[in-house]
Image (cartoon, rainbow, N blue to C red):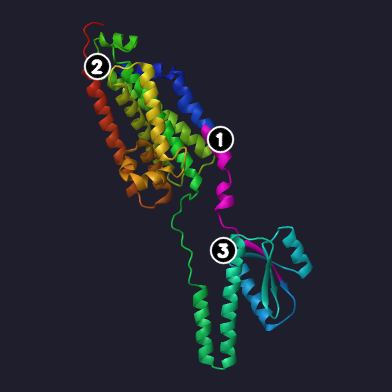
Amino acid sequence: MFLHNFKFELLSGLRVKEMIIWLILFPIALGTCFKVAFSSVYENTMVFEPIKVAVVTEEKTLDSEMFKETISQVKNEKDKLFKVKLCDRKKALKLLDDEEISAVIFAGNDISMTTASSGMSVTVAKAFLDQYIHSRDIIINAMKSGDTQAYESVMKAVSDDTQSVVKKQMTHGNTDMYIQYFYNLLAMVAMYGSLSGLHIAIGSQANLSALGARKNISPTPKLIQITASLCATFVMEAVCIVIAVTYTRFVLRIDYGDRLGLVYLAAVIGGCLGVSLGFMVGSIGKMSLGAKSAMCSAVSLGLCFFSGLMDGGMKAKVELAAPWFNRINPAALISDSIYCLNVYEDLSRFWEKIVSMVVITVILTLLGFVMTRRRRYASV
C-alpha cells in the first residue's frame, strides 16, 4: 500500500511543471547569471598581484649596489612582492606613461621614486622604500662606527625585522567572497522545495482540492498517504538539488572545496527542510491553493533574502541585530553548512548546522501531520 502510493506520488510529481521550472531550470539560469556577473571579480579586486616597478641605476655607488642586491632578493622570493624591470631612465618613464608599471625607483647617491598615480600598489612600494632607507642608514652608521660586534647586532636586528611577518594559510578552502551567492542559490533551491511540500498538504485536504476529497474516501490510512507523499517529494527534491550542485560544480566550475560528498549531504537535507516547511504552511487554515502558494513563496524568498541571496552583507547585518534568527533561518543554515565545509578544517560547525536542520525538519513535519490528520469533514 505504501509503495503504491509512493509510486503514484512520484509519477504525479514529475508532471508538475512548476517543479521543473523553479527547481531545475530557474536555478540553472540564475547560477549562470551569477557566474557571468562575478566571473574573475575576486581575482581582479581581492587577490594580491606582484607590484610592477622599474629600477633605474643612474650611477654605480655603494648605495645603488646595496639596493640592487635587496631588490633582487625580493624579486626572487617565492611569494613575490615586486615584479622588477631593470632598465634606463627613458624606457622606465615610457613604461610608467604607458601604465605598464606602477612606479620607477631611481637608485644612485639617493634613492627616490616616481609615480604617475596613487593607489595601494604605490603605497606599498613607498612603504618598502622607506623601510629600506631606514635600514640602510642604520647599517651604514654601524659600519662607520668600526664596532664589529655592534655591526653584527644591527645586521641581525635588521634581518629579524624583515622576517617578522610569516605567511600562514588559515584555510585551504575557497575564500572568494562572491561564492556565498552560490551557497545561497542552493539554499534557494531547497526553499523552493516548499512549493512541492505545499501540494502534499493541499492534496490531503478534502475541502481544498478534488484530489484531497478522493484521498479522504480512500481506505488507505491518511498517515500512510501523507508519509508516502512526503517520501516521494523528498526524493524528487533531492534529485533537483543534486542537479543544482552538480551543475554549479562541474559546469560552472564553482569550487566547493574537497568535501563535495558532504556538500551534497547538506544540500539534500536542506531540500528536505524546504519540503517540510511547505508541508507545514500548507496545513495551516483553510486558505486556497493560490493564497498558500503566495504565502509559501513570500516566506521562502524572505528567508533567502535574510540569508544573503540578494544582498551579500545581509546575513552579517542580521547577525549583529538578531543573531538568533540566523540560527533558525533554514536558508542561512543551508548556506552556512556549505560555507563551514569550504572554510573550516574542523567539521564541528558543519555538523551543528546539520543537526539544526534535521531538528527543524522533524518539528515542521510533525506540525504538518498534526494539523492535517485532525481534519474531519461533514461530507465529502
Q: Earlier in the sequence, mark 1 or mark 3?
A: 1
Magenta-span inclusion, residue 34: yes
- Quadrant assignment, res 138: bottom right
Nearest to viewer (mark 1 / mark 3): 1
- The reply, left or right, for residue 375 in relation to residue 71 is left
Q: Are marks 1 and 3 in contact (CB under 8 Å)?
A: no
Residue 291 x/y as whole percent: 37, 19
- The reply, left or right, for residue 370 in relation to residue 151 is left
Which SS class for mark 2?
helix
Q: Which residues are magenta?
A: 30-55
Disc 3: which residue: 79
Rendered image: mark on residue 322: none
Q: Residue placed at 77% from the left, 62% from the top?
A: 94
What crowding class fits label 3: few (fewer than 14 Cα within 10 Å), some (14-19), or many (20 or more)? few
Q: Are marks 1 and 2 in contact (CB under 8 Å)?
A: no
- Quadrant assignment, res 49: bottom right
Which SS class for mark 1?
helix
Rendered image: mark on residue 33: 1
- The reply, left or right, for residue 323 in relation to residue 158 is left
Residue 192 x/y as whole percent: 41, 28
Which residue is nearer to you in this view: 143 or 218?
143
Which residue is nearer to you in this view: 201 or 265?
201
Dot 2 amino acid type: Lys
Dot 1 amino acid type: Cys
Q: Earlier in the sequence, mark 1 or mark 2?
A: 1
Label 1 vs label 2: CA separation? 43 Å
Residue extending farthest to the top is 379
Q: Residue placed at 61% from the left, 67% from the top?
A: 125
Disc 2: which residue: 222
Q: Residue placed at 75% from the left, 69% from the top?
A: 87
Label 1 vs label 3: CA separation? 34 Å
